[in-house]
Image: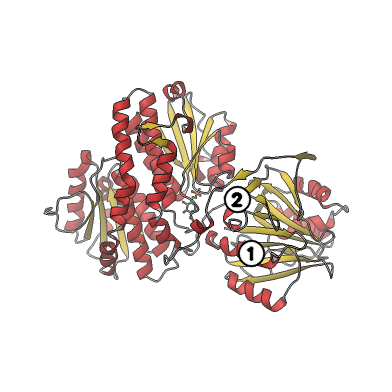
Amino acid sequence: MCGIVGFTKKKYRSACCLEVLLNGLENLEYRGYDSAGIAVSDMEHQELKLCRAVGRISNLRRVVEEEKPEGSCGIGHTRWATHGKPSVENCHPHLAEKKTVAVVHNGIIENYQALKLQLQKEGVHFASQTDTEVVAQLLEKQYCGDMKKTLERVLPQLEGSFALAILDRNQPDTIYCARRRSPLLLAKGEDGAYLASDISALLDYTRDVWYIDEDSIAVLTPEEIMFWKDGEQQFPQSVHINWDSSAARKNGFDHFMLKEIFDQPTALRDTLNHYVDVEKGIIRRETMPFTMEQAKALKRLTIAACGTAYHAAVMGQSLLEQVAGVPAMAAVASEYRYSTMPPMEGEVFMAVSQSGETADTLAALTHKKAQGLRCLALSNVIGSTIAREADHVMYTLAGPEIAVASTKAYLTQVLLFEILALDLANLRGVLSDEELKVRIAELAQLPEQVEAILASKKTVEDFVQTQKNCHDIFFIGRLMDYASSLEAALKLKEISYLHSEAYAAGELKHGTIALVDESCLVVVTATQSVVLEKTLANMEEVRARGAELLLLGHFPVDHPHDCTVWNIPACSDQLAPILTTVYAQLFAYYMAKMHGCDIDKPRNLAKSVTVE
Ligand code: G6P
């Protein structure tokens, strides 16, 4: 979705403002966008200069090269169209009519039509169909000679969500910012002050960032950053992000997605070592969200998330119930945010979100917090909005995830659910310290087991070549294999645009089997011993309808199943779905590659969905 970047340069420093803006926008490309633009304050001519282009940043670079705007302070934006089609007029930044104010915006101004109508009645002419332009026009119209005071007057008139970065023609080295329910972070570097909607835009310059509080204003000059809330100056602490900028590069892989699939052993190791002392076979108490008393009092954990994170939540639900005997419920956040269920005594809520910024997940958390529930978060981004809103955060240590289709974040989310379930089981007295040690030793093998699957990528690639004409793929499994099938089907449809569906294997014959014929591929995941025979019987049902079969699990070399089998290393039933998922990720990747799809930036999708 939309991305914001901004920079105001110190005098006599060599950094090039335009390059910082364009480079920042390129680093935000992964979020998905359809057009991009920048605005710079030209001190000499006392004007705000715009360069905008539809399509890729390379198009914007061409416009910048032709028009050669000058300035050492500017803002940039990648737009993912919501109000008005992708066009140069609708592209951010937006200038107010008299060109005194330029604005970039993430989020949605929900009352923009009413505001626009009012401004039009007052004689203001609009140049775009966007909600954002209303902000620029309001700021110009209500300008009182001081942009901070003007913002304090305008912000309460806006309904909805926003992260705003604003240039005022009268102060050519200053950027004004404000936010409500949309992320924005600020940073100081050697060359000046920066802002961005996402740390990836700034990793080349700094690691220490400030987050702006909800409904706050920040003012950036080359030398300092000032924060204001309700008219009072604030002095927030900065947060250190220890991501490596090379982690946000492809490092020789054809796509970020493949690189991130191969990052998984490291991501699992880093996450595991943070929460668990593998040598001693204990969980590090200080990293866990529950004390023994809280664990015993826990009656239900409700988990809300979107997309792949929701699938991790489904996996978490099974793990918490099976391992710790904790009733759990995974919910789709966009639905759950409107749930009218009153909170239950002993209930705890958890939001799962890689980015920590997904609007629906955040709304579900805010809703539950308002009901007085203790709220936990599981996120990959330090200091993200969801992380800050929660009472306790468990971070996945997956590093930056750039490909739209989530891989390493998902695997580490599931690992965290494994660890949480073990911890709760131990605290609630259903798993002894000795048993815990054994389970931790199994977890410690996961990174190597994932490496073993990655080493057989050629097997996956070769199989995919036999599937050129396959356009319908069903993923079936039972219990945790159903949960992993949901993710396998999503991965495939997201990046290859092939029709794929996941079904609880036993449910297939209640309808969907009508669709199965010899043109379909059915991927059967069968790792859960308690239902193994039943799943294999379901496999026979689809075989009888002529479908081609691919079987994932652990089967002997001389297995009797007349189909392609991809084996995973020996492991417990609870860890097996993590390993079959790696095959599913590789399968989706090579299918998408064979069909020539834009794997890292699939059509219509965005990495972080910050609007409802
Ligand atoms: C988008 C992305 C998905 C992601 C989902 C939730 O739909 O394309 O890959 O799983 O958002 O994102 P989150 O950051 O909350 O995990």
Asked if residue 500 is positioned above or below residue 342 in the image, the reply reads below
Q: Is residue 541 left or right of residue 283?
A: left
Provide the residue designation for mark 2.
207
By what rule are the colours in the image chosen?
secondary structure
Residue 449 on image: x %, y %: 29, 49
What residue appears at the point 47 percent right and 59 percent down from the top-left corner?
403
What residue appears at the point 69 percent right and 69 percent down from the top-left corner?
89
Give the quadrant of the N terminus.
bottom right
Residue 373 visible to the viewer: yes
Which quadrant of the figure has residue 317? top left
Distance from Cα at disc 2 to Cα at disc 1: 35 Å
Specify the label residue 84 is tagged with. Answer: 1
Asked if residue 370 is positioned above or below residue 334 in the image, the reply reads above
Residue 217 on image: x %, y %: 74, 46
Which quadrant of the figure has residue 235? top right
Residue 340 on image: x %, y %: 52, 34
Q: Amino acid at mark 1?
A: Gly
Q: Secondary structure at mark 2?
A: loop
